[in-house]
Image: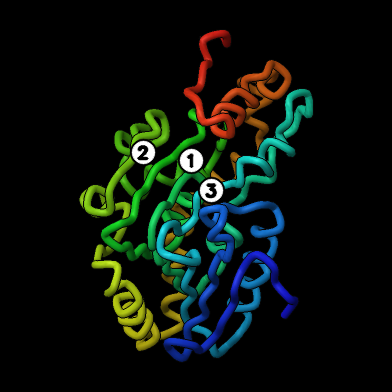
Amino acid sequence: MPDFQDILYEKHGRVRGAAWITINRPEAMNSFTGQTLTEMAEAVADASADPEVGVIVLTGAGDKAFCAGGDVRWLQAVQQEGAGEAAPMDPHAGIEDCLKPVIARVNGYAVGGGNHLAYFSDFTIASENATFMQVGPRVGSPASGYQVANLVHVVGAKKAKEMWMTTRRYSAREALEMGLVNAVVAQEDLDGEVDRWCEELLQKSPSCLKILKASFNLAYKSMKEASARDWVQEIAPDFYTSGEADEGKNAFLERRETDFSRFPR
């Protein structure tokens, strides 16, 4: 395996048969860059190909954040005004194509792309201090296609639209009630709960689990194919040149409220 910079990758540590992938950027709330996503995808591919690995755990370093989504400074660089292109925003790092069970161990904020990562995982185990939210419309980051639409299959259309369009925050208990997570435990019990889920899954037929996951993946196959369309160019072709993409990110970095009032509704 390569010498990763943004993640920690361990196999057969806490539970034999489990691989742990940890985003190791706690100073940035475990937000990701293109480098982070590339490393995560390489680790997922390695775990997928390893016949001794039966389950993958995704988490973030520390106890404040699982993943705060795309690093705003990185997004600003790749979505700069006038660039006319979007960031390579696929925070799933191949987990939807991996046929082994993937558990998101959410130990704090799961925001934006971090929330995508959690709800694309097969199971989500959260500590009581976890917070879930989307921020796309708030920071001018236009996620689109199946990475948005798949949330409908998780929590239903009304809640999915509420989460995406209002950018409200949801506690771990609220996330449990809406079906966004599978279990909520105290922070000190989080690792033990994740271990129990790993051990339970590792007792099952690995071939059956792969067949089941491939079958569930059919739910968003058509959405994934439709995502080949450039939704930004179709719906808001001036988005990256008008300054709208910059306003949210600048406001975040300047610690002020956004002002989208000058952009047409």
Amino acid identity at mark 2: Ala
Circle 1 residue: 148
In screen coordinates, is 205 left or right of 181? right
In screen coordinates, is 131 left or right of 260? left
Please tell me the numbered disc located at residue 160. Answer: 2
Give the mark, 2 or 1, whose residue is nearer the N terminus.
1
Question: Quadrant of residue 186 in the image?
Answer: bottom left
Secondary structure at badge 2 equals helix
- Image: 201 above or below 236: below
Q: Are marks 2 and 3 in contact (CB under 8 Å)?
A: no
Q: Quadrant of the N terminus?
A: bottom right
Please tell me the numbered disc located at residue 69. Answer: 3
Instruction: Estimate the spatial distance between the alpha carbons at disc 1 and disc 3, rounded to whole Å.
Output: 14 Å
Question: Quadrant of residue 209 in the image?
Answer: bottom left
Amino acid identity at mark 3: Gly
Instruction: Estimate the spatial distance between the alpha carbons at disc 2 and disc 3, rounded to whole Å.
Output: 18 Å
Secondary structure at badge 3 equals loop
Rendering coords of residue 110 (x, y %):
43, 52
Rendering coords of residue 150 (x, y %):
45, 46
Amino acid identity at mark 1: Val
- Image: 12 above or below 132: below
- The residue mark sitting in front, 2 or 3, is 3
Viewer-side residue, 104 vs 169: 169
Number of other residues with Cα within 10 Å of mark 2, as a class: few under 14, some 14 to 19, many 20 or more: many
Q: Are marks 2 and 1 in contact (CB under 8 Å)?
A: yes
Number of other residues with Cα within 10 Å of mark 1, as a class: few under 14, some 14 to 19, many 20 or more: some
